[in-house]
Image (cartoon, grey):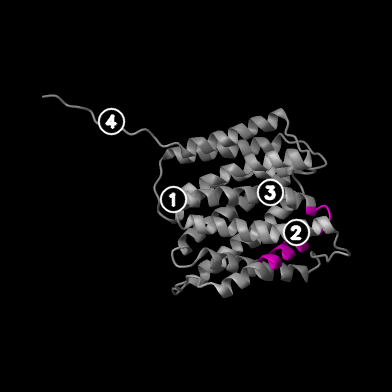
């Protein structure tokens, strides 16, 4: 049961990140938030790495996979998601994460030679139609000034997330979850540190207490805890089974957004959400086994 408990807790942490990011982006520059988040995560994970005997068996060419792991997530994933939350609501962005299990399954078919039937593709099309409906049916508001752009950016973040999950599964055989999390945190610190030296990065004039504590939470709890728990769990269970837990994120996030941010979806958006989840259910449902026909002499 431990891997499944770890996955559930990781989903709850990741769901809360939509709320935390929406809150701190109203105070700090997004690039600064991501840089601080990655530095805090690195400072937390390094002492753990130094005190542990983390498992690693480097093979020739692994540097490309390790680089791809960190580039997919957190670098590009966080960049797309940060910009998405500047344009759409936390609730809508969270619903789009329901497409991630389908993307992971499709990626496993294309890159890991896993074979699946037409059902997965039918589910993907239905779910994608729900995402399009959610995006086109959304109206601009204070929490979602440009939902069309924001939801499109969040979907790009999901593609990066799928890449991360597939690579993490491949590398988890030779590297511990703690080591892979450290690689991600360090690469994120370097990536967003360089971004802070460009005109896109803005250092804050002051550090208000509560927004600063949220940034610490993002780095220490969500980045270190969420990714550490998921990477450990994915080394114990199938990647497709682990990816199905992503469907908990929209449920947690919509509830948290309603409780903390006061966000409410309209009827059209709820119907679009139902279509997204319907596509996920279609893709996850196992086809009925074909019963052999009894032949009598």
Question: Which segment did they paint magenta?
Answer: 24-41
Mark 2–mark 3 contact, CB under 8 Å? no
Identified at 53% across, 58% down, the residue is: 231
Q: Which mark is residue 109?
A: 1
> Which of labels 4 and 2 is toward the front?
2
Quarter containing the C terminus: top left
Q: Please determine whether, in this image, residue 167 is positioned above or below residue 10.
A: below
Residue 191 seen: no
Across and down, in percent, residue 84 comes to 72, 50
Specify whether 163 is left or right of 210. left
Q: Which mark is residue 75?
A: none
Across and down, in percent, residue 217 comes to 71, 57
For label 4, the SS is: loop
Specify whether 3 is left or right of 33. left
Residue neighbourhood size for the residue with mark 2, other residues' Cα within 10 Å, grouped as few (<14), some (14–19), many (≥20): many
Q: Main secondary structure of the magenta part?
A: helix
Q: Please determine whether, in this image, residue 183 is positioned above or below residue 221.
A: below
For label 1, the SS is: helix
Q: Please determine whether, in this image, residue 58 is positioned above or below residue 17.
A: below
Q: Residue furthest left?
A: 297
Q: Earlier in the sequence, mark 1 or mark 4?
A: 1
What residue is shown with label 4?
Answer: 291
For label 2, the SS is: helix
What residue is shown with label 2?
Answer: 215
Q: Earlier in the sequence, mark 1 or mark 2?
A: 1
Between the C-alphas of marks 4 and 2, the distance is 56 Å
Does the magenta portion include 28?
yes
């Amino acid at each position: 049961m431990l891997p499944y408990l770890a996955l559930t807790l990781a989903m709850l942490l990741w769901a809360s990140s939509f709320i935390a990011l929406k809150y701190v982006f109203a105070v700090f520059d997004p690039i600064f938030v991501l840089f601080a988040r990655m530095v805090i995560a690195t400072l937390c994970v390094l002492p753990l790495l130094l005190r542990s005997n983390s498992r690693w068996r480097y093979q020739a060419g692994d540097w490309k996979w390790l680089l791809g792991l960190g580039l997919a997530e957190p670098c590009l994933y966080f960049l797309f998601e940060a910009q998405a939350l500047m344009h759409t609501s936390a609730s809508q962005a969270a619903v789009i994460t329901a497409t991630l299990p389908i993307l992971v399954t499709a990626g496993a078919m294309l890159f890991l030679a896993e074979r699946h039937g037409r059902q997965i593709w039918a589910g993907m099309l239905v779910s994608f139609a729900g995402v399009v409906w959610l995006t086109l049916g959304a109206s601009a508001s204070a929490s979602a000034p440009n939902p069309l752009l924001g939801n499109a950016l969040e979907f790009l973040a999901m593609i990066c997330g799928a890449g991360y999950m597939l690579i993490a599964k491949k590398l988890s055989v030779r590297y511990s979850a703690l080591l892979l999390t450290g690689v991600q945190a360090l690469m994120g610190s370097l990536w967003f540190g360089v971004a802070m030296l460009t005109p896109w990065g803005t250092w804050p004039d002051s550090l208000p207490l509560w927004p600063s504590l949220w940034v610490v939470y993002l780095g220490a709890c969500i980045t270190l805890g969420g990714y550490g728990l998921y990477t450990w769990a994915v080394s114990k269970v199938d990647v497709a089974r682990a990816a199905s837990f992503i469907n908990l994120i929209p449920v947690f996030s919509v509830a948290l957004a309603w409780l903390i941010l006061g966000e409410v979806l309209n009827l059209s958006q709820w119907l679009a959400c139902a279509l997204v989840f319907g596509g996920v259910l279609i893709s996850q449902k196992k086809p009925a086994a074909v019963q052999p026909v009894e032949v009598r002499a």
